[in-house]
Image (cartoon, rainbow, N blue to C red):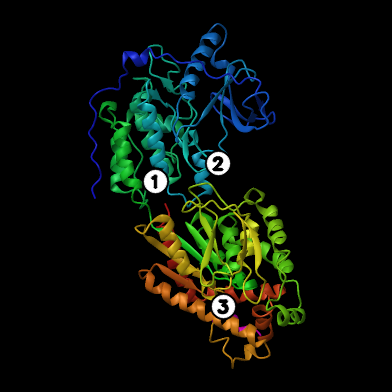
């Protein structure tokens, strides 16, 4: 499929006389309804300081919304010019207040009690700027941000009256609660009018040189839609690479490079920046403004790019009581090869787990913890979950066909969530560009019908589960905990008794194709096992000698189910995509009693022994070679 062609415009942007004379209603005055949260600004800019505040729609309203208050610096208009400047500022805010678009920051109005000039009030964007968001959300498809920004800028340019942004860069684009980029900070923008507001030149645009077009740096023209198109290409480069344009060159030197030597950034070594993308940027930063494409044309091309998303990266974690630390140690080893402080949620699009593997899946995906952070929480959490001695477990097992009470599990998981991410108590994450995670459960009255409790909305569902309830549901596995009622949309009786789903790899493939579409390629699937095999649990194995026959049988059936899913997964994916890591030959090498204590009796006080065993497995030269190949595969699919 070829990229849509761009016809190069040969005319300057113009506005009609009607647009020039457009009547603009004054902005909404919310003075007295907005209050600051603290005396110190959240951020500072060249034209003003931004404070976090709250807004009530009326004096009698009990509900409040969090807002951003931009206090304009008074030196911008001193003496007799202040009143005139204030009127122009009100006029521009009045225009922006009428704009309605998903990719434009919503404005609420102005307040006159925070400074000598009116203060624009807008909705608070909790995710901050695109720069900050991409630094902590490496899993985001950055092409979707290029599309959203193009949508917003095209909307401004085709508004009546036409609007120029004037200061486009990643730091002036905010990210909504849903992960949508919103154009903001119109401190340098103006409406094309007979009486232009806020002209710019090199002396007043300090800090924006890297994004400014040659004609602006030379002082030959004012801001224009063409200079916005140039800035869009620079901003796109910034988003795709994570670096500002000309990042290795001093800011002052950029003026000479662009204005006098007509230089542009060198093409980075980034497989995601295709020839088509680079060609578009080259057209956008042409020296002659008249031959740059219009934003509507740019938008059509970017839609073509965004329609080809990168392949998916999936992570599957087996269930298995305290043995789930095996998965975390293996994952930690992989993340260390990717880079310092790398988190799985930044590199995987979807994480699935069953049993304690499900708990870890939610800790990694919903709570956005690193493998190290999860490991630090395992012992205190397991100490409370598995609080019975082997003798007491055996006695309880003979009576109840389980070894532990599930009554306190909700509280245990809730305490952990409160300690690490209290803002993630509800399971549903409304952001679009985040790692998705789900756990496997089933309803006792509907055997062989696995359910998926998700951290995201899919198929019209809107789960009302607390995160701790999802964790409680998935750990109710045979021989461990009794079934439990969980409050979601209604009270539902849950268990996790489908042994074959202890390895959720095939469930993960099905879910990924359902959520992202059958046509979306899977770039890699990593499956983490927990060190048991049907062979090591055979009836004549010394490792099961003296164990309860029913308990040993369930564990053996579980191991067989895990192996069946592994072999099925191999048939579902192309070679080189699926990686299964399982210390199945290492864990049984432990002392017989240690192995029994871990596998049969969930002895949390032997996690260090298990960790050392897994490290030996990962340090094996053959395993290390496969891990390196796997990491390359992950990074190859990373935008």
Q: Residues within 10 Å of mark 2 (few under 14, many from 20)?
A: some
State whether residue 484 is above or below residue 305.
below
Give the tally of numbered discs: 3
First in residue order: circle 3 vs circle 2: 2
Residue matched to label 1: 143
Q: Where residue 257 sits in the image (x, y, percent)?
A: 36, 32
Gap in Å between the C-alphas at discs 2 and 1? Answer: 18 Å
Residue identified by numbered label 2: 127
Q: Main secondary structure of the magenta part?
A: loop
Say whether marks 3 and 2 touch (CB < 8 Å): no
Query: What range is drawn magenta here?
Result: 583-591
Q: Secondary structure at mark 3?
A: loop
Secondary element under disc 2, as helix, strand or loop, is: loop
The single residue placed furthest to the top in the displayed view is: 80
Q: CA distance from mark 1 to mark 3?
A: 40 Å
Q: In the rendering, at what x and y percent does residue 302 appear?
A: 33, 42
Q: Is residue 549 shown left or right of residue 396?
A: left
Residue 584, position as x, y percentages in the image: 54, 80
Instruction: Give the number of the disc on residue 531.
Output: 3
Residue at point 56%, 53% (across, down): 463
Q: Is residue 586 magenta?
A: yes
Q: Can residue 514 be seen from the camera position used here? A: yes
Task: Answer whether residue 587 is magenta in the image.
Answer: yes
Judging depth in this view, the residue of 452 and 531 nearest the camera is: 452
Tell whether 44 sits left or right of 547: left
Label 2 or label 1, whichever comes before in sequence order: 2
Looking at marks 1 and 3 on the same chain, the residue that comes earlier in the sequence is marked by 1
Q: Position of residue 252 (x, y in %)?
A: 44, 30
């Amino acid at each position: 499929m070829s990229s849509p062609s761009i016809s190069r415009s040969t005319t300057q942007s113009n506005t009609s006389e009607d647009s020039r004379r457009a009547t603009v209603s004054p902005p909404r005055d919310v003075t007295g309804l907005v209050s600051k949260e603290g005396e110190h600004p959240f951020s500072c800019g060249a034209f003003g300081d931004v404070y976090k505040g709250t807004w009530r729609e009326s004096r009698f309203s009990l509900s409040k919304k969090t807002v951003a208050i931009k206090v304009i610096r008074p030196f911008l208009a001193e003496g007799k010019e202040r009143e005139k400047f204030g009127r122009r500022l009100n006029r521009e805010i009045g225009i922006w207040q009428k704009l309605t678009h998903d990719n434009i920051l919503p404005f609420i109005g102005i307040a006159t009690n925070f400074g000598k000039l009116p203060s624009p009030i807008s909705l608070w964007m909790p995710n901050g700027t695109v720069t900050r968001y991409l630094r902590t959300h490496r899993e985001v498809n950055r092409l979707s941000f290029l599309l959203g920004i193009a949508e917003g800028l095209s909307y401004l340019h085709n508004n009546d009256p036409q609007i120029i942004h004037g200061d486009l860069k990643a730091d002036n684009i905010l990210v909504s609660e849903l992960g949508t980029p919103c154009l903001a900070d119109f401190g340098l923008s103006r409406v094309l009018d007979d009486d232009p507001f806020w002209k710019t030149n090199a002396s007043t645009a300090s800090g924006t040189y890297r994004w400014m077009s040659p004609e602006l740096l030379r002082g030959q023209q004012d801001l224009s839609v063409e200079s916005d198109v140039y800035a869009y290409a620079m901003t796109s480069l910034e988003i795709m690479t994570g670096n500002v344009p000309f990042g290795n060159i001093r800011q002052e030197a950029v003026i000479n490079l662009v204005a006098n030597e007509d230089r542009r950034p060198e093409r980075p070594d980034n497989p995601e920046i295709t020839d088509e993308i680079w060609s578009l940027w080259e057209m956008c930063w042409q020296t002659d403004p008249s031959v740059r494409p219009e934003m509507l044309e740019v938008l059509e091309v970017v839609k073509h790019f965004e329609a080809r998303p990168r392949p998916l990266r999936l992570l599957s974690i087996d269930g298995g009581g305290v043995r789930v630390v095996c998965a975390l140690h293996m994952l930690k080893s992989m993340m260390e090869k990717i880079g310092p402080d790398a988190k799985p949620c930044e590199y995987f699009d979807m994480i699935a787990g069953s049993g304690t593997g499900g708990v870890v899946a939610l800790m990694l995906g919903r709570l956005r913890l690193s493998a190290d952070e999860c490991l630090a929480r395992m012992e205190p959490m397991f100490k409370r979950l598995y609080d019975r001695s082997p003798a007491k477990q055996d006695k309880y097992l003979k009576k109840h066909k389980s070894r532990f009470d599930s009554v306190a599990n909700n509280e245990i998981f809730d305490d952990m969530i409160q300690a690490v991410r209290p803002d993630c108590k509800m399971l549903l994450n409304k952001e679009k560009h985040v790692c998705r995670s789900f756990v496997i459960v089933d309803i006792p009255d509907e055997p062989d019908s696995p359910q998926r409790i998700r951290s995201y909305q899919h198929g019209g569902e809107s789960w009302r589960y607390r995160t701790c309830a999802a964790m409680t549901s998935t750990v109710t596995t045979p021989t461990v905990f009794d079934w439990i009622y969980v409050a979601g949309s209604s009270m539902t009786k849950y268990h996790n008794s489908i042994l074959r789903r202890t390895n959720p790899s095939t469930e993960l493939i099905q879910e990924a194709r359902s959520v992202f579409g059958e046509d979306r390629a899977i770039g890699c699937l990593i499956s983490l096992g927990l060190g048991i095999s049907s062979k090591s649990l055979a009836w004549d194995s010394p490792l099961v000698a003296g164990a309860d026959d029913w308990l040993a049988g369930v564990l053996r059936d579980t191991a067989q189910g895990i192996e069946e899913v592994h072999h099925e997964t191999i048939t579902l994916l192309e070679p080189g995509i699926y990686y299964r890591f399982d210390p199945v030959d290492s864990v049984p090498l432990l002392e017989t009693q240690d192995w029994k204590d871990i596998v049969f009796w969930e002895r949390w006080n032997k996690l260090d022994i298990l960790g050392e065993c897994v490290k030996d497995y990962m340090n094996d030269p053959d395993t290390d070679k496969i891990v390196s190949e796997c990491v390359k595969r992950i990074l190859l699919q990373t935008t």
